[in-house]
Image (cartoon, grey):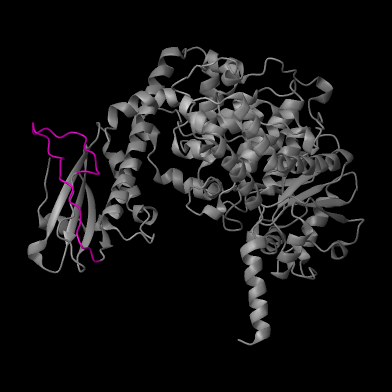
Amino acid sequence: MKVHDTNQITYLHKYTIQIPIPALADCKISTPSSVPSNGVSSPTSPSQGYSLAGLDTQSRISLTFDTIDHTHLEFIVKKASNRASQRSQRTMVVEFDQLHEKSIQLMNDRLLNIEYRSGLETSDLDPMLWVQRIVDYLWFELRLDLVWLRWAKYLKQSFQTFQSSVDKAWLRKAMMYNTLDSDYQRHYVQDLDWRFSDLNEGYDICPTYPSTLVFPGNLSDEDIRGAAAQRSIGRLPALVWLHANTKAPLCRASQPLAGLSGTSLELDKKMCVSIKNSCPSGLPLRIADARPKLNANANAVQGKGFENIAFMGGPSVASLIFLDIENIHVMRNSLYKAKDGLEANGEASSVSGTMAAATFDSNVNNLHASKWSNHIASVLRGAMGIADSLMIGHPVLVHCSDGW
Amino acid sequence: MDGNSFHVFLFYYLINSFIFLLRDRTAQLSSLAQLMLDPYYRTIEGFLVLIQREWCSFGHKFEDRLGRSGHSKEKSPVFIQMLDATWQLLHQYPTSFEFTGHFLTILMECLYSGFFFTFRANCELDRMKLQRNVLSLNEITGDELEYGNLNFYIHALLRCNNIATLVMNANYRPPLPHEKQIQYLRPRCGNVDIDVWREGLFGWNFNIIELSSQAEIPPVNVLESHAVTNDMFGRYDNSFSFCYYYFIYYFISLFVDI
């Protein structure tokens, strides 16, 4: 085990987290136990090995970490106060298996951002808890990496045992995960009135969209850029699927920035009309809005909302349907309600480790009372409406609020 | 601030806080519509492609919806609902899917594991950044296998005979030549027609429990018992996943001595 002196610690300011300490009447002292008796360093539990003795209101606790060599990572918990004589520090060392130098470097890069995720912004004022939480979090992260590494090594060994050198077709198939372009080509999109576009290659038109998108062929790049500006978060209509027989396209988008009138969206209208014209059936575009109409109106007050059909060109060009599906908070509360029912029933089940049949019946009743199945049914009904429209030959544009 | 503008402010505030947040339906609806129409997406390969395009590429907020980003208001079982609806389709049309319900449950376990980049990050751009920052196992192990890739993991599972017999549907009827492109499943979807997805919502060993419900002391499988004691969100948040539980369990005990 290597122990740093104060000069070395100040040199390592790059990784230091400063924690203010409130007034404390008395602070429990945990004895350090990280020094092994035989002098050989061993994996150490991080929640032991530091103490918080003699803290006053002006002092701060700093947590420092650095690599000692390629196989060790060291945490230093340091108490800094105004008086230099009261400075004290505790160190702990985590030992790794033999890792690459590069992996340690990568791990250090990750640790730079760790203070934002470690619960420092909570209102919990106990410094002991704070330090413990940070150290536990670091330990958890490192442990995950170790587990993952071990798992990968184990998998690799097991693959080498059963994979034959003759048949590696499955491996090639498994590695070929980016098959989206070929999936579009499966529907012969390139032979129809659609074009592949890499306008979003730098993710500047819409940061939450993929880099390759499919648009109607008659639109120029400027049109597409303008149409993206007229949708919420830039999520403009893009093709996802094409009906093989009727050639009716299925597109998705977010809500338009329509406002209450919705008559200023020229490029968005051009986009929708060209989607409609790309379908050989000539049927009007069906815009499926997943929200209830009440919520869509509330969004329209905020300058977003839904498409103006009269501005699009009347019912011969487009029609608007509201699918009346509840929002994500209703879904979450529905699942929580079912979970509460389970907890109320389940003491006996947690003792025996399994669930009795009567308990299961009441669990199912609770699930029905939480209307989970009703929500599933409404989602299925909405999807079936879209599928019906595509079977008839209507082009369909699906959107809700943000279209995630 | 006069009274009128205060009312406008209050109105906007209320709308912002209660009504405005409503999302995530687009991916559900479009992917389910494609599942109903296109038989390719009912194969294992096609289902993975569908998830890759509709959910990962087009930016479903996995990190927020699974509750990993710390905002409890953003947490919501949207992807679970899609898996549940897929299971309803599978339940009503048992011969038209290449996979069984176990496959959906495995996907659900993978979803909450955090091991797969497919279910991390909020959009494709974030996922690329994350993959750049996180330890790359290819660089460490020096081979071409990609361990954080869900597609790779599923294919590796299918190589094991025991798991393949669980996951592949024995009753699968591949589409005939004239319905290779379009084969429309039109499910019954009244509220009564929706069955409970027991495996996904109540845990893996439910079939075991059903068989042994008459016995006085039901058999306890130690390795699976965590799936019943912690239900719903809690079970997935707090415990490691079932499908690689066997892989990891031994190695955790080697390294962790807290």
Residue A81 vertical position relative to residue A72 in the rendered view, above or below: below
User: Is A346 contained in the magenta span?
Assistant: no
Q: In the image, is B186 to the left or to the right of A160?
A: right
Residue B37 vertical position relative to residue B22 in the rendered view, above or below: above
Per the rendered image, the range of residues in magenta is: A23-48
Q: Residue furthest right?
A: A316
* Relative image position of residue B126 (x, y in whole percent): 50, 50
| Residue at x-position 55% and y-position 55% | B73
Q: Nearer the viewer, residue A365 or A381?
A: A365
* Relative image position of residue B40 (x, y in whole percent): 72, 28
Q: Nearer the viewer, residue B87 or A217?
A: B87
Q: Nearer the viewer, residue A84 or B128?
A: A84
Res A262 → quadrant:
bottom right
Q: Nearer the viewer, residue A189 or B103?
A: B103
| Residue at x-position 74% and y-position 30% | B89
Q: Is residue A69 visible?
A: no
| Residue at x-position 62% and y-position 27% | A358
Q: In the image, is A138 to the left or to the right of B191?
A: left
Q: Is residue A161 visible?
A: yes
Main secondary structure found in the magenta portion: loop
* Relative image position of residue A223 (x, y in whole percent): 72, 61
User: Is A46 contained in the magenta span?
Assistant: yes
